[in-house]
Image: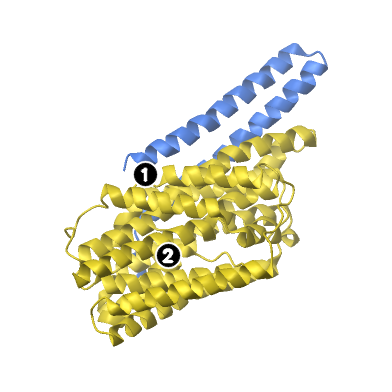
Amino acid sequence: MSSDLILVIVVGTALAFDFTNGFHDTANVVATSISTGAARPQVAIGFASLLNFVGAFISISVAATVAKDVVDAEVITPTIVFAGLIGAIAWNLVTWYFGLPSSSSHALIGGVVGSAVAAAGFDAVLADGLVGKVLVPAVVAPIVAFLVAGLAIGISYRVVGKQRPGIVTRGYRYGQIVSGGLLALAHGTNDAQKTMGVITLALIANGTLGAEADPPTWVIVASATAIALGTYSGGWRIIKTTGTRIIKMDAAQGFSAQGAGAAVILASTHFGFPLSTTHVINGGVMGSGAAKRLSAVRWGVAGNIFVAWLLTLPMAALIGGLTYGFTRIFGTGALGPVLVTLMALSLVAVAFSRRARQGAPVEAVGA
Amino acid sequence: MTLATLVQWKDMWQTVVASVVAGVGITFAFSLGIWGTGQFVEWSRDDRPAAATAAGVIATVAFLAVAAAVIVSILVMTQK
């Protein structure tokens, strides 16, 4: 009975994380379309939300990596998964509060690794999966997106350089509907799978599923719905940072950044790499800016984002580990997770009310 | 264990190649489509029908190539 209650709390928390993931990462998907005037904010967000939902159904490779290749499922308990999720949600909210586009994916993996280490030591971590499928792709993917976007914008400027600006801008704005849609689809398939993977891990840990089981259909549908609702709710503060503060984009840059991001995420998802979609799209945005003119990139803002990226894994791991330690004060039953959930909900309510008092959503540029 | 043995280099390499080909290829094809559209309009206005038709064909083929690349990328995702 107690383990089932913990499992229900874990599933609820995982779906809450999925919601914050969509909420937090809306910027990744729609910021470039909005900032170049390719789409109105509400239309872009609605479109992205729908495609995030659809994207969640097209692959389960990443879910398998999260469930089976990062931590040893045999030593994991639902409480460990719960503590990891709290670490991820807490870090997501902190970075959202300060308007930093950090990685929800790395927060999730960091949180689960931190709580697993706190519970069972470093033997609980599968080093080959963590390094080979998470850490190295985490470094490589944004660099590839940076280079692809830079190369792509260089080529596109050469091809259309002598055309009238009106037709070029209109053309790339139409193109951004396609590239933005593809990016939303890519985001849905890579990010929703991380939640599917974590819920599957908890179900395996609880003995509800076998060790090699794939995510059940209800997990896929619930994860798709949560990320789509989160995306629709939107994270306006981060949209502003990604869309206007890193570089001032034209439509061609927006198209190449989104195209590069979608290509990297879809290719990585095919091989089961749980990428940070945030890192990838920001790499694309910076690449498309730097290729035009190095000084076009606001490197100070980019530096802040870089620091947030560096801190995400260790900070989420630390919070996850501390949360697990706190829950164990109350034994192995459901009391610890219930108390942490109540405390987390209170903190979320305070953060949202403070943020709501401090400012209205930003206005879109060029929309 | 070393980094060399932990990383799945073949998958990583294929990911990088696919990303570069798709990311750069789609942008190039789309840019070619815009160029073709612009030239079609301009050459039609300048009363150069043969050149305008050629530009229109280039634009059409380029946009079809973009559409095909998007469809193929989604199909590849669903087949694993």
Residue positioned 68% across, 57% down in the render: A290
* Residue beneath disc 1: A57
**Amino acid found under the numbered disc labelled 2:** Val
Examine the rendering and report whether any part of residue A158 can be seen. Answer: yes
Q: Position of residue A297 (x, y in %)?
A: 70, 61
Give the CA separation, mark 1 to mark 2: 26 Å
**Amino acid found under the numbered disc labelled 1:** Phe
Comes first in the chain, label 1 or label 2: 1
Q: Is residue A316 above or below residue B16?
A: below
Is A112 positioned to the left or the right of B41 in the image? left
Other-residue count near label 1 (Cα within 10 Å), few / some / many at <14 / 14–19 / ≥20: some
Q: Colour of chain A?
A: yellow
> Quick one: SS at disc 2?
helix
Chain seen in blue: B
Q: Is residue A168 above or below residue A128?
A: above
* Residue beneath disc 2: A136
Is A57 positioned to the left or the right of A279 in the image? left
